[in-house]
Image (cartoon, rainbow, N blue to C red):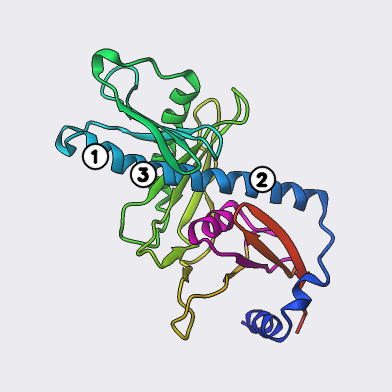
Amino acid sequence: MRLVLSIAAFLTASTSAVAATPPKLTDAERAAVALAERRGALLYSYDQAAWHGTDDLLGKIDRAKLTSGGWIVDGPADAPELVFFDTSAAQPRAIYIADFKDGKIVSSRVIKPDDAAPISPIRQRMIAALAVARLSFAQQQVKLCSKERPNTVVLPPDTPDGPILVYLLTPQPDMGTFPMGGHYRVEVSSAGKAGPVHAFANTCINASMQDVKGKAPASLFVTHLLDPTPTEVHVFTSLAAHLPVLVATISNRYLWTVTGPHVVASTVLPNK
């Protein structure tokens, strides 16, 4: 609690000091930041594609006739492709595909069973990894921070035989609240084995779009205990909220500014 209070006092006393003494990052910290930036941008892009693509699909097909086993998204953050799939047959098949550019649908189509094209091996791996990850999350009985159904995002492997990352995300309870707790990640190997479940926070943390006076904040703020650098969840939150997120990492006492997909170490926090 003392550190949280000192951070608040520090920010209140001198905004200009935040940029005055940026810490010198190690190679490991720079690598972690770059990874968080890339993964966070993909998380947000893929999650948005799933949201808008679902709305588009339900406008094209009767919900009662929808036999989807789920969805995956791949491609670059600025031009992802969404695939809803059906797993009722021996091999998963695509039932809907939507292409996006800069957050907007540029084309979409419902695929009839007779026109179904085979799903690529990488996408088949992503679909299988999603099923493995869901089982792992259930077995670990991960704590969500909402009664609403959680969202899932699957990141494609960096190499053909690389691991696949699957995220379980607590959804927003409303448009003005952004959960930064209740998010999890699991790595699924090329052999289809799930690794340990990684939690991004120890408790449920909600960032609000209203400050104590009921006004829109200039930025969001959170302390982070589990890593020495901000994570992809902080990048995801900044992109979703359209606000900077100030992240105080406790282990090294750094204050970071996360602005969309960009993470900068702003200053070293005072001891008192």
Q: Does the magenta stretch include residue 158?
A: no
Q: How far apart in space, not on screen, are marks 2 and 3 (Cα)?
A: 26 Å
Query: Does residue 83 show up?
Result: no
The three-letter amino acid code for the residue at tag 2 is: Leu
Is 215 placed above or below 170 here? Answer: below
Helix, strand or loop at label 1? It is helix
Q: Which residue is disc 1 drawn over?
A: 58
Tell whether label 3 touches label 1 (CB within 8 Å): no
Quadrant of residue 12 in the image?
bottom right
Mark 1 or mark 3: whose residue is earlier in sequence: 3
Q: Would you call the spot at circle 3 few (<14 residues within 10 Å), some (14-19), or many (20 or more)?
A: some
Mark 1 or mark 2: whose residue is earlier in sequence: 2
Image coordinates of residue 97 in percent, x first then y, are: 36, 28
Helix, strand or loop at label 2? It is helix
Q: Residue at x 55, y 59 (%)?
A: 238
Tell whether label 2 touches label 1 (CB within 8 Å): no
Q: Which residue is drawn at 43% across and 49% down?
A: 140
Q: Which residue is disc 3 drawn over?
A: 52
Q: How far apart in space, not on screen, are marks 1 and 2 (Cα)?
A: 34 Å
The dot on residue 35 is 2
In the image, the segment drawn in magenta is 226-251
The residue mark sitting in front, 1 or 2, is: 1
